[in-house]
Image (tube, grey):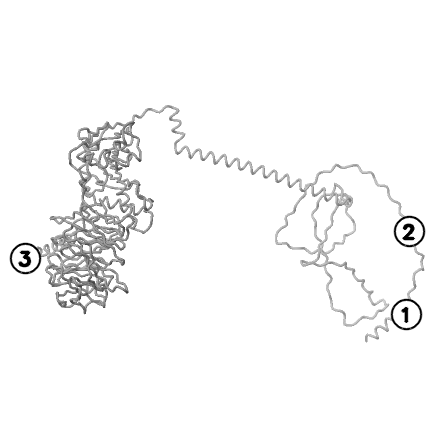
């Protein structure tokens, strides 16, 4: 073998070993539910008998048995304690359960006769939290997690006495137990990842093996040749009985491993943020084959398949009082039987509970009322808002919107299952609504839907090409409160076609038939007939057919024409220009300009008023000053006032010696003491005094004086900022001619006579001074 050929073979082997990802729908969708009671809840356990005729469901403290064909209740058993696990024996006659034990009743595993619904007297105490009870192939041994320690115990049927204890491997809780199909070996695994194989005598076959992560499930393949292990992180590994690895794949959120009866297909239940549902693999190569999408949580799963290994009925426990049932289609009772049929659904009116096809049963139609013509009962005239509505839009794409209204009971069941999908609350959120719409859309066979519409629609010109499918909820789910049993869910399926060749108008569109729902379509729940049709498009004249009965003879046909465009008149053109968005920008600019001018005008008025008020205030103050000081005439004006600061005399120390007074010429005369007026001091220095000058005094003294004026020393005050000089406006006073005042006569002054004063004795004064001087010495 050449090196190139060897490389090619290795490459092909690697490609075949890699699981292929596929999004092919399984053809199953939600179509029914089994109800425990109207107020049932907490459904998290399922068990299917081997021949697939009875499904056992646990709700609260009740175990309820349902018929898998009619989904009707056939029996119920109640317990005071919670149930942790249950499993049918190989022939389906006995149901083993593991319930919680009490201090008074020290037993957990009990047996129930399915036919009589009687509980066996025998019982045994195991780990009452263990879920994965396992029966041996012959039905004579039951295995479960033991009560005393981390062991697996085998109990004899029917007395439930201990046969073997499998110990020495597990040190934490056991999570899975399975018997091989030949009944020779038993497989166990635990939370730490340890797994081991035992014989029926309880002897370990070889040493235990570490998986590398905690185990959630472990199974023998149906032929008994392989062992399949599933870890906590979703890693699924297939090994031979001798321990050699076959295939490995990983799927986030994997919970349980299941096989078809033949072992050809492996099914994995999954609950993750991105996907909730069942993934089907080809076990021979671990290639993904198809998926079934759920819109609710996944607690437990059971299924019934056919001879071709295809699942026909899927039961899912969603944590509520009902079990969701996924089917391929629904065959209604009476379908195909002869008789008059108003709505054309192939069910005679005497057997059809909804003759008019609006989703409301006939017994309720007359009570609810309708807009039927006079003399026509509501049970024979459908509510046009509830019947199937098909809207075809012609434009860039050719779009077919198929809108259905689900019956009230089914709508209530769907809302009940959806409430716990993402959060346990009383109101459905938008995310839960989208989860339902996406799950139902992915379960449909999209290629069948496209082919049905392409076969039914015919165009006078042009040709339809490839198409895509999308779905959404129109009404009836979001923000609908718990307990609403009447609001219907409206569901829309949109098929968007591209054009292989463009269409021209006028265009005739004809529908030859009303397509039935495809496999996996939730449309099976809603009446398919009659149909309301609407045809529309941009720039096209809309056409409607309000009621199209499925009588097999009539075709639905319309002609789509473009809307005639008339030449606009001058007034219409002016209005169009005036209403153009750009024109509104111009209008806005004008409004802003007018607003600015108005504001400026208002501000100018305010400034003028303030100036006038200031002048009035100044005049009033001047008048008040004149009234307070009568000596000030109207000819006075305000002048700048200059502060005059008198210097404080400097303090000097007293002379050390007093000089003796002398009358000689050589001695200088004593200097006269300068009289300083008292000046009051404040915090900032001496108080400043100001003078006011009169205009008349200035005029009178305007002539310069020949004598040199004596200027008192002034201390300049430096201010941090240049003072603002406020000027007063003084009204000009009219000069009045003043009469010269008559000179007042001076009063005669009496002069003192000379010599009337006392005469100073100089000798005596001299002696006094000398005596004072000598005293100081």
- Residue 613 percent coordinates (x, y): 64, 40
- Towards the viewer: 284 or 601: 284
Badge nearest the viewer, 1 or 2: 2
- Seen in the picture, residue 497 relative to 692 is either above or below; the reply is above
Give the percent coordinates (x, y) of residue 13: 11, 55
Establish if 393 lies above or below 724: above
Q: Quadrant of the N terminus?
A: bottom left
Question: From the viewer's perspective, is residue 745 above or below residue 676?
Answer: above
The 10 Å Cα crowd at callout 2, few under 14, some 14 to 19, many 20 or more, is: few
Residue ID for mark 3: 1
State left or right for residue 249 relative to residue 432. Answer: left
Do the residues bearing badges 1 and 2 touch, measured as CB atoms within 8 Å? no
Where is residue 233 drawn, in percent x and y?
23, 58
- Can you identify the residue that label 2 sits on? 749
As drawn, is 207 to the left or to the right of 718? left
Whichever of callouts 3 and 1 sits on the residue coming sooner in the sequence is 3
Q: Quadrant of residue 353?
A: top left
Q: Which residue is mark 1?
A: 764
Secondary element at image label 1:
helix
Q: Residue at x 20, y 54 (%)?
A: 117
How far apart, in angstroms, are the residues tagged by discs 1 and 2?
A: 35 Å
């Amino acid at each position: 073998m050449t090196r190139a050929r060897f490389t090619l073979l290795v490459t092909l082997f690697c490609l075949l070993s890699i699981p292929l990802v596929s999004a092919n729908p399984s053809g199953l969708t939600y179509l029914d539910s089994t109800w425990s009671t109207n107020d049932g809840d907490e459904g998290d356990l399922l068990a299917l008998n081997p021949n697939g005729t009875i499904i056992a469901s646990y709700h609260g403290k009740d175990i309820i048995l349902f018929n898998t064909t009619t989904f009707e209740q056939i029996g119920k058993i109640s317990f005071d304690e919670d149930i942790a696990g249950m499993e049918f024996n190989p022939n389906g006659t006995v149901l083993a359960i593991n319930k919680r034990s009490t201090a008074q009743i020290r037993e957990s595993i009990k047996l129930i006769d399915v036919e009589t619904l009687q509980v066996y007297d025998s019982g045994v105490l195991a780990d009452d939290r263990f879920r994965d009870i396992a029966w041996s192939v012959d039905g004579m041994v039951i295995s479960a997690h033991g009560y005393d320690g981390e062991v697996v115990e085998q109990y004899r049927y029917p007395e439930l006495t201990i046969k073997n204890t499998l110990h020495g491997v597990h040190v934490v809780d056991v999570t899975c137990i399975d018997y091989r199909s030949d009944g020779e070996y038993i497989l166990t695994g635990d939370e730490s990842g340890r797994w081991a194989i035992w014989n029926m005598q309880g002897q370990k076959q070889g040493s235990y093996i570490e998986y590398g992560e905690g185990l959630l499930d472990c199974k023998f393949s149906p032929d008994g040749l392989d062992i399949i292990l599933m870890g906590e992180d979703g890693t699924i590994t297939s090994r031979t009985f001798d321990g050699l690895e076959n295939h490995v794949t990983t799927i986030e959120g994997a919970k349980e491993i299941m096989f078809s009866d033949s072992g050809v297909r492996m099914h994995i239940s999954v609950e993750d943020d991105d996907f909730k549902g069942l993934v089907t693999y080809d076990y021979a190569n671990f290639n993904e084959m198809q998926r079934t999408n759920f819109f609710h949580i996944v607690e437990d799963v059971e299924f019934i398949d056919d001879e071709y290994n295809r699942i026909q009925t899927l039961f899912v426990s969603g944590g509520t009082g009902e079990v969701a049932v996924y089917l391929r289609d629904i065959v209604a009772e009476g379908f195909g039987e002869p008789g008059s049929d108003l709505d054309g659904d192939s069910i005679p009116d005497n057997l059809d509970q909804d003759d008019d096809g609006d989703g409301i049963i006939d017994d309720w139609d007359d009570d609810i009322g309708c807009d039927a013509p006079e003399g026509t009962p509501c049970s024979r005239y459908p509510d046009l808002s509830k019947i199937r509505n098909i809207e075809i839009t012609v434009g860039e794409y050719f779009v077919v919107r198929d809108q259905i209204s689900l019956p009230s009971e089914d709508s209530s069941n769907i809302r009940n299952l959806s409430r716990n999908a993402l959060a346990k609350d009383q109101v459905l959120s938008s995310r839960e609504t989208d989860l339902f719409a996406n799950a139902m859309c992915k379960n449909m066979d999209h290629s069948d839907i496209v082919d049905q519409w392409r076969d039914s629609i015919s165009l006078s010109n042009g040709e339809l090409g490839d198409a895509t499918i999308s779905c959404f909820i129109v009404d009836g789910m979001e923000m609908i409160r718990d307990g609403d049993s009447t609001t219907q869910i409206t569901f829309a399926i949109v098929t968007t076609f591209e054009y292989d060749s463009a269409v021209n108008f006028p265009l005739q569109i004809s529908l030859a038939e009303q397509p039935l729902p495809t496999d996996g379509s939730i449309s099976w729940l809603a009446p398919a007939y009659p149909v309301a049709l609407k045809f529309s498009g941009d720039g096209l004249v809309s056409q409607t057919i309000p009621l199209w009965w499925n009588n097999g003879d009539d075709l639905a046909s319309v002609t789509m024409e473009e809307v005639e465009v008339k030449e606009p008149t001058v007034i219409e053109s002016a209005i169009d220009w005036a209403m153009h968005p750009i024109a509104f920008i111009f209008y806005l600019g004008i409004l802003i300009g007018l607003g600015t001018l108005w504001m400026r005008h208002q501000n100018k008025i305010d400034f003028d008023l303030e100036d006038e008020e200031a002048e009035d205030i100044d005049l009033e103050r001047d008048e008040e000053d004149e009234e307070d000081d009568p000596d000030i005439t109207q000819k006075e004006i305000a002048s700048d006032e200059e502060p005059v600061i008198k210097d404080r005399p400097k303090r000097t120390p007293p002379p050390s010696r007093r000089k003796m007074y002398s009358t000689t010429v050589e001695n200088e005369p004593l200097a006269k003491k300068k009289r300083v007026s008292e000046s009051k001091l404040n915090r900032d220095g001496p108080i400043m005094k100001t003078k006011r000058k009169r205009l008349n005094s200035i005029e009178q003294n305007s002539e310069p004086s020949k004598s040199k004026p004596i200027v008192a020393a002034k201390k300049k005050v430096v201010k941090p900022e240049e003072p603002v000089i406020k000027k007063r406006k003084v009204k000009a006073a009219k000069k009045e001619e003043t009469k010269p005042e008559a000179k007042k006569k001076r009063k005669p002054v009496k002069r003192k006579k000379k010599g009337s004063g006392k005469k100073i004795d100089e000798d005596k004064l001299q002696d006094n001074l000398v005596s004072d001087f000598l005293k100081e010495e």
